[in-house]
Image (cartoon, rainbow, N blue to C red):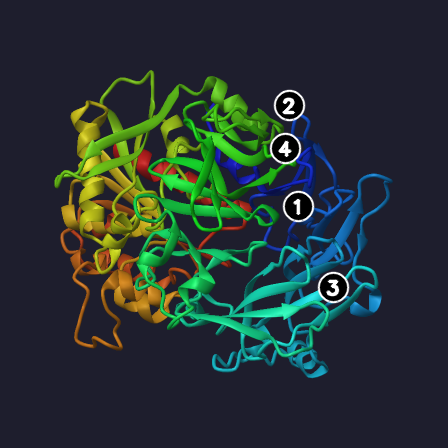
Amino acid sequence: MLPKPEAIAASDGLHGPSLSPDGSQVVYSVRPLYKAAETDFSASCIWIADTGKANSARRLTSGLFNDSDAVFSSDGASVLFLSDRHERGGPMQIYSLPLTVGGEAAPLMSAAATLKRDVQVFEASPDGRYIAFVSKDEPTAEDEAKERAKSDALVWSERRKDMGRLRLLRLATGTVSSFNLPADRHAHNFAWSADGESLIVCITLGPDLEHMGFEATYYRVTVRHPNAEPTLLAKYQDAFGEYLTWLADGTVLETRFYNPQTLTSALAVRNVLRDCATNGKATAAGAVYSGSNDDVGFIVGLPHDNLVAVEVISGVDSRIDIIASSGILQETVYRSSDDALGDQSWDIKRLEDGSYVFACIRSSGPRKEPSNVWAGKLDSKALPGTLTQLSSHNSWIDDISKDSATATSVFRCKARDGTDLDGIICKPTNAQKPLPAILIAHGGPYYRDAPSYIFNFCTWREFLAAHGFCVISPNYRGSSGRGAAFAETMYGGVGTVDWTDCEDMLQAVIDQGFADPERLGIAGWSQGGFMAAWGASQTKNKFKAAVMGAGLSDLGTMCEEAEAPEFEVEFAGGAPWTSPTRRNTNDPIRFVKDVETAFLILHGEKDQCVPVGQGIGFFRGLRRMSKFPERHELVIYPREGHGFTERSHVEDVLKRVLDHLSAWLT
């Protein structure tokens, strides 16, 4: 049984595992990866499982509404979550579902406090008396009248209505109040103090990625006096901070760039207040943990113990380290083993006896295990760590796995300059070698390929291998998992060693007899789409076919049009407004002349990350300058952004990718 586009498009995604206070249960969300139709409302249901019992996962809510972001209350007696169950497709509000006495989910805000705007993110106080959350300002009568009249001109310099506001819900009364923070700034993230009396909040110039390159400001606010003047704590030179954590000893930790002077650096754990205690300018020397030789993924604070659990990404592997507030390693409690954790998809609790309970969403390509929830007690003396599978979602993948004659494994080689490289290779096991081969570069570039087992609209490794291709996925320079120096090669360096790393790994696979050099393809999404365009434009005829998914072709216009211009400026090595005479020499659009590779170009019409003009421009260049203009095809998907949401579009993408590569390589 082969993986079919229809099955992939109809599959479910698992999100946000969250443990109960005693670690005995875990809740998580399950939602369709893609909507059946453009007009469909989003739907999601909450599941619960017992961490010590295999296959104990069971549905907690119906799935008729958009129930998501579930967490346990501080006493473990109920589950708090976001939902539109008051109005399907309406604004997301905070609900509570009792577990011990039964009953229906009920909204936590009083009728008078119910919002017309989405609650974007929320977190209960450690003592369970309050919930802090972020939502946009409520619409005025004038706003609603303009919306009805479609008087909706966007004035970019006046976007106050887009700002997220930090608010406080008092559970005893159901009333909501707003903290007294600057009205012209956006609440980016926040964290509770261990005693539940205060919050630290990071505010930024605005909610968009474009604003992340500008200064962030940290304030302290109190729940007893939300209207009081906030206490200014620190200013940081950029707003690219995540997973803010406030420990009982007063330490404030966050994931930030190891080298704050560049946006292309690796991620590390940083002490925000210490970084900015002198002149507000952090340096690489101030990193608390990781970022030099490996990278930080997700962190979870254990505030009362003054500890933080850190996901450390090291090559294709991951581990969970427990560190003190000072950054000193206490112990490693988990290591991956031929598997991969999902992004931001784990939780951990420290029990009274000092042991840990860990829950995660993970998958394994080598073992052909699709994403499911796993959990167990961790013992630092028994690594890599034994977990129990709690759920069995997407059973159609299990059926494929039983019949699939493919093998996924880590592949290592040397770059031409001696740098150690790793990546993933996935290939049929029973087919005659050498095989038609496809180089698939990941997006980012600050990302990595790990030994996961994933099927979606833009992750084609397992999908194509099952259909007879040898697929090579290199972690080229610029990827995560190898520390700051490895990542920072992308400062003005796209199309340099990132490309030669890909080329060198492909050649190593050819040299070992797995890939047929006469039947090569190249593909990728986002930065991977750039790599496909760049690789084919540089080699002209090395690759018979290419798939450029939401790819970059002109870095100068990316600086002007994309949603994160500061990132693009660093990748390009300069901005059009500071270097008006400069044209980036590593733009694929400049090298389309005499290209023989047949291109399939795929792009979402509403893509803000990589605007659709990047695909259109490259297509126009190929049709005018390549050696065989008739070989190229451009497909634009209405309503879609950088990540696709509609099932019919996902099916179409997968069918076109398979048909295009099969036509040219088999």
Please name the amino acid that badge 3 sits on. Answer: Leu
Between 36 and 563, the one lying in front of the other is 563
Residue with the mark numbered 3: 169
Which is more N-terminal, label 3 or label 1? 1
SS of the residue under disc 2: loop
Q: CA distance from mark 1 to mark 2?
A: 23 Å
Closer to the chain start, of discs 3 and 2, is 2
Q: Position of residue 645 (x, y in %)?
A: 53, 50
| Residue sitting at x 19%, y 28% | 510
The residue at 59%/79% (across/down) is 183
Residue 301 lies left or right of residue 263; in this view the side is: right
Q: Amino acid at mark 2?
A: Ala
Q: Is residue 181 left or right of residue 213?
A: right
Q: Quadrant of residue 198?
A: bottom right
Secondary element under disc 3, as helix, strand or loop, is: strand
Per the image, the residue denoted by label 2 is: 54
Do tag 4 and tag 2 residues touch (Cβ < 8 Å)? Answer: no
Q: CA–CA distance between discs 1 and 4? A: 36 Å
List the residue tagged with mark 1. Answer: 44
Q: Which mark is residue 353?
A: 4
Residue 450 at what x, y percent from top left? 38, 36
Q: Residues within 10 Å of mark 4 (few under 14, many from 20)?
A: few
Q: Earlier in the sequence, mark 4 or mark 2?
A: 2
Q: Is residue 640 visible?
A: no
The x and y percentages for residue 592 are 18, 55
